[in-house]
Amino acid sequence: MIRTLVVDDDFRVAELHAAFVERAAGFEVVGRAHTSRQALEAAVTLQPHLVLLDLYLPDLPGLELLARFRALDHAPDVIVVTAARDVATVRAAMRNGALHYLVKPFDARRLVEQLDAYRRWQADITRLAEASQDDVDRLYGRIGAPPPGPGGHSRADEPTAQLILEALRAAAEPLTANEVATAVGISRPTAQRYLAWLHEHGHVERQLRYGNAGRPSHRYSVA
């Protein structure tokens, strides 16, 4: 079972999220916390595998708490669950190790689908003794793929998609997937997956260019 700690300053929201987690196959809620201090103490004593972390906490900013989690001997994985949707906060969460970022409000299906992706990611990473490049690409893809929206379709307003679009708008010329990955702070396979979806749904344009060595590369810009 994946031991999960739910952190939210609102008692009712914490209970709601805990109920979602309990319904997800392979998960158990081992604790709830409503302040950063409670969350840090719970992470040390309960040693959860996963934390659902709200960023709006009364005693310490959630981003700072996220950094403190990473310093623990048994550092948990973290999925941020918050109403904060500004790009700077999303970027800071990613740089501090958040596996994913869910923007409130969302329906139960969105959270359960992300938990299921995490469960499959955990199973894969536990099974492997060594990882080939294909294994690494698959692991990054499992946790970083664009989450489904209504009707099973991905959404361009999802935080990582928004970061990619911001990077493309800020660029002086079209970018490769590798350049997008560097600008946003994500893996190249994740950037490729988002760019492919954004292109398929008309949010970005893709063009083939040849470099000095004659090797073609796809470059992306906002449509």
Image (tube, rainbow, N blue to C red):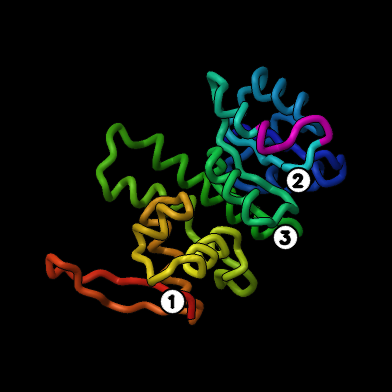
Tag nearer the camera, 3 or 2: 3
Could you tell me if residue 20 is visible in this image? yes
Q: Position of residue 214 (x, y in %)?
A: 13, 70
Is residue 66 found left or right of 165 in the rendered image? Answer: right
Secondary structure at badge 1 equals: helix
The answer for how far apart the CA atoms under marks 3 and 1 are is: 25 Å
Residue projecting furthest to the front:
172
Secondary structure at badge 2 equals: helix
Can you identify the residue that label 1 sits on?
A: 199
> Three-letter amino acid code at disc 3?
Phe
> Three-letter amino acid code at disc 2?
Ala
The answer to whether 200 is drawn above or below residue 195 in the figure is: below
Residue at left 40%, top 34%? 126
Q: Position of residue 199 (x, y in %)?
A: 43, 76
Q: Residues within 10 Å of mark 3 (few under 14, many from 20)?
A: few
Could you tell me if residue 1 is visible in this image? no
Can you identify the residue that label 3 sits on?
A: 106
Mark closer to the chain start, 3 or 2: 2
Does the residue at mark 3 contact the one at mark 2 (Cβ under 8 Å)? Answer: no
> Three-letter amino acid code at disc 1?
His
Residue at left 58%, top 70%? 155
Q: Position of residue 183 (x, y in %)?
A: 45, 55
Residue at left 43%, top 69%? 172
Q: Residues within 10 Å of mark 1 (few under 14, many from 20)?
A: some
Q: Position of residue 149 (x, y in %)?
A: 61, 68
Q: Which of the image's four quarters has the N terminus?
A: top right
Can you identify the residue that label 2 sits on?
A: 19
